[in-house]
Amino acid sequence: MSSKWTYRHGLVTRARFIPKRSDSHELTMTPVSSQDVARVAFHSHHNNWHYDLLMLDHLKANNRVWAARRVAADADFFKRLDRQQAPEYLWIGCSDSRVPANEIVDLAPGELFVHRNVANLAPPQDANYLSVLQYAVDALKVKHVIVVGHYGCGGVSAAMSGTHLSLVEHWLFPIREVAHLHRDELEAISDQHARLNRLCELNVIRQVKNVTSALTVGDAWARGQELRIHGWIYSLGSGLVTDLEVTTERPEDIARLASA
Ligand code: ZN
């Protein structure tokens, strides 16, 4: 049994449903997956509230209210978005749930192209990020790429603690390189949180340098396309972003980031 989710006109729809009540008599096994948990919960269907939570009905209800509110304010909102997207900005941010891209800058659907990963990295060998960048610059013609880090980033912290082995540590390795490059400055900061936060800033600056060095960006500038790369840092405690003032808008600007 599986379910497939689709998004259209602002509404989330599940294409296939779990078995009808008459099918549930066969399910007396020990749950081995989230679907099985839902089926077993359905089997004891007297507990409807539990079933609703397992099947995320509260999120589906939220979605309907949200879509209705959008349509009430602007009847053609989703019809317009269905035809095209024309965002001016690409946001490269951390996956952290406390750093919701659109919300922080109060932009509506269609206004911000978003790429998020652990610790807002833009590694030159990462096909995922590079594809997003290429599509944003070449197809959508965004005017700004904004790398947005945040203070207290768990990814940056984990990169330095060395307690996360395997894949995550591999992903976070570029941050260790940044820390090594700036070890004198970082070691001079006695407060542990202040040191982590400075590394969060340095990490953003390095990612701005990476994006600035990307072939996609160089090609765009070579053909005269207007494009700026920015580095921001977000404070979880205040909800405010700070511009790190490392904006680049032409290839020569990379020289200012040479030490990043
Ligand atoms: Zn983070």
Image: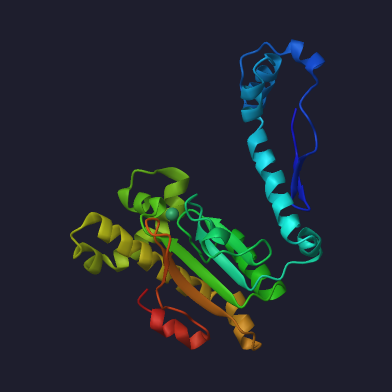
Above or below residue 21? Residue 175 is below
Image side of residue 245 versus residue 87, left or right: left
Residue 222 position, x and y percent, is 62, 87
Q: Nearer the viewer, residue 207 or 3?
A: 3
| Quadrant of the rendering where the C terminus is positioned | bottom left
Above or below residue 53? Residue 176 is below
Above or below residue 48? Residue 235 is below
Q: Please give the name of the residue rendered at 18% of the width and 65% of the height, measured from the top-left corner.
A: 188
Residue 67 position, x and y percent, is 72, 51
The quadrant in which residue 215 appears is: bottom right
Q: Quadrant of ligand 1?
A: bottom left
Image side of residue 209 versus residue 64, left or right: left
Above or below residue 180? Residue 43 is above
Residue 143 position, x and y percent, is 61, 78
Q: Please give the name of the residue rendered at 31% of the width and 68% of the height, measured from the top-left corner.
A: 181
The image shows a total of numbered marks equal to 0
Q: Nearer the viewer, residue 20 or 154?
A: 20
Image side of residue 244 versus residue 88, left or right: left
The quadrant in which residue 51 appears is: top right
| Quadrant of the rendering where the N terminus is positioned | top right
Q: Please give the name of the residue rendered at 59% of the width and 78% of the height, measured from the top-left corner.
A: 217
Q: Identify the colour scheme used.
A: rainbow
Q: Please give the name of the residue rendered at 74% of the width and 56% of the height, measured from the top-left corner.
A: 72
Residue 259 position, x and y percent, is 35, 77
